[in-house]
Amino acid sequence: MLQYEARGGDVVLTLLEPGTAGTVAFLRSISLEAVGLGVHLAAGAHDILLQAEYILTAVPSRQVSSSSSTAQGKKKSNVRSNQPKDAQEGMQQAYSNLSDGLGKSASALVRTPLKKYQYGASAGSALATAARGIPAAGIAPVSACASAAHSALLGLRNSLDPEHKKESMEKYLGPTQTHNRD
């Protein structure tokens, strides 16, 4: 496997018998675990940032709980049922997630205040709308980056371990719907 030696302050790692199936299996297992951990961390960070984004959008508290839970339910079901089949599709979803996050920021800072001004609000009111949108506009790209990392890592994991994707799909969609999607 790996040989670790410390010689005079230098650390030397040597791969022993690189052609063995055991070494390859070990490295594959470690890689899958690392990618899986990244998937879970990115998903958790995205969920937290999404909650912060909902809180900062200045929606009244009764609507935040109901609308955010509805939106989150849709998002979670989409993430679980719309998993990328491979790394390439994961990168495409990541790009889409980044684009959506930047669009949310642009909307909060420019589009919404501009529409308000065009519909007769004063310039001060439009600027106040833009100022209120700054916190959410700052979080949206960060949340999008977490979502993009999740999609990219999920695609990589599904490329490395297609069986895990199948198990996940069966867990969340049931065995009959899973076969229809493959």
Image (tube, rainbow, N blue to C red):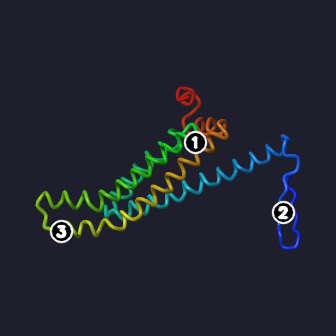
| Quadrant holding the C terminus | top right
> Which residue is more in the foreground, 161 or 14?
14
Mark 3 residue type: Ser
For residue 11, which quarter of the picture?
bottom right
The local crowd at label 3, few if under 14, some if 14 to 19, many if 20 or more residues have their Cα within 10 Å, is some
Q: Which residue is mark 2?
A: 12
Q: Which residue is mark 3?
A: 125
Q: CA distance from mark 2 to mark 3?
A: 64 Å
In this rendering, would 51 be left or right of 150?
A: left
Which residue is drawn at the image coordinates 65% and 39% (left, top)?
A: 164
The local crowd at label 1, few if under 14, some if 14 to 19, many if 20 or more residues have their Cα within 10 Å, is some
Counting residues from the start of the chain, the first of labels 2 and 1 encountered is 2
Q: CA distance from mark 2 to mark 1?
A: 32 Å
Mark 2 residue type: Val
* Disc number placed over residue 100 in the picture, else none: none
> Which residue is more in the foreground, 26 or 79?
26
Counting residues from the start of the chain, the first of labels 1 and 3 encountered is 1
Q: Which residue is mark 1?
A: 87
Which residue is drawn at the image coordinates 83% and 46% (left, top)?
A: 23
